[in-house]
Image: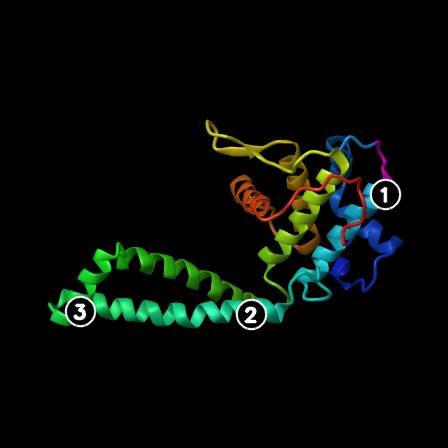
Amino acid sequence: MTTPALLAQFESYGPQVRRAALDHFGKSIEEIEAILGKPSPDEELRDVLGLMLWKYARGVAGQDGSGRERPSEISHYLEALDNPARRLREALETLLRADNHDDASASTVAILLDAASVEPMVVLKQLGRILAVTEKAATEKSTGGRPPDVEHGLLMTRAADVFELATGRSATVTSNPVHDTFGGGFFRMAELVDAAAASATGQQPKSNAALGGELKRLRASRRPHDAKVQNPS
């Protein structure tokens, strides 16, 4: 098996890259073929999966990437969120401190916010979550490439496209409320693709909960396909 770094270093996709990418799937490629109702080996499907994995590895390594979002565009929106979020957090913290010290003006503003059903403490928690996202992205940007979660979302979107194009069914996930886990045919395929992606980039596979949550969010933002399997764009 090739080392994770080598897959990203290939500048174009060809037979050598295909073999290197499929090494990261191992025997799981046969399970994916079975999930999609394909004979084994299905060379066209394997070519699609190898190409997907190579593009993912390139994107995580800061090379070609998947092309849907440019790093500069992502940074633009994150920075546009970061600065006002910080200013609003500081303003609310100042307001709450003044209100706690019986500042009449601050108390009046607090009353106005309460009348508008705005809870400063709730807003502060939400701002904290926003800033956690922007700070994480800024840290990852310093290492080069797109944030891994963005690149991973593109990989899972492609996996959903392949599933729908191959089966004619929607790429949905099911949940088991008793065991608090996700499952289903597409979810299992996504798990196998995620494991191969982790192998190809030296990362850890996502947990059942993390992957299931990501797939549900992606599902809400995409439209199903009804054609046959083809190379992802």
> Which residue shows up at 15% across the image and 71% down it?
105
Q: Amino acid at mark 3?
A: Ala
Q: Give the farthest residue toward the top.
A: 178
Q: Amino acid at mark 1?
A: Glu
Taking the image as drawn, is residue 103 in sight? no
Picture disc at residue 44: 1
| Residue at mark 3 to residue at mark 1: CA–CA distance | 66 Å
Compared with residue 44, is residue 119 higher up or lower down, i.e. above or below? below
Residue range in magenta is: 39-44
Picture disc at residue 75: 2
Between discs 1 and 2, the one toward the N terminus: 1
> Which residue shows up at 51% across the image and 67% down it?
78
Q: Amino acid at mark 2?
A: Ser
Q: Nearer the viewer, residue 31 or 216?
A: 216
In percent of width and height, residue 58 lies at: 72, 61
Between discs 3 and 1, the one toward the N terminus: 1
- What SS does tag 2 mark? helix
| Residue at mark 1 to residue at mark 2: CA–CA distance | 36 Å
Label 2 close to label 3 by CB (< 8 Å): no
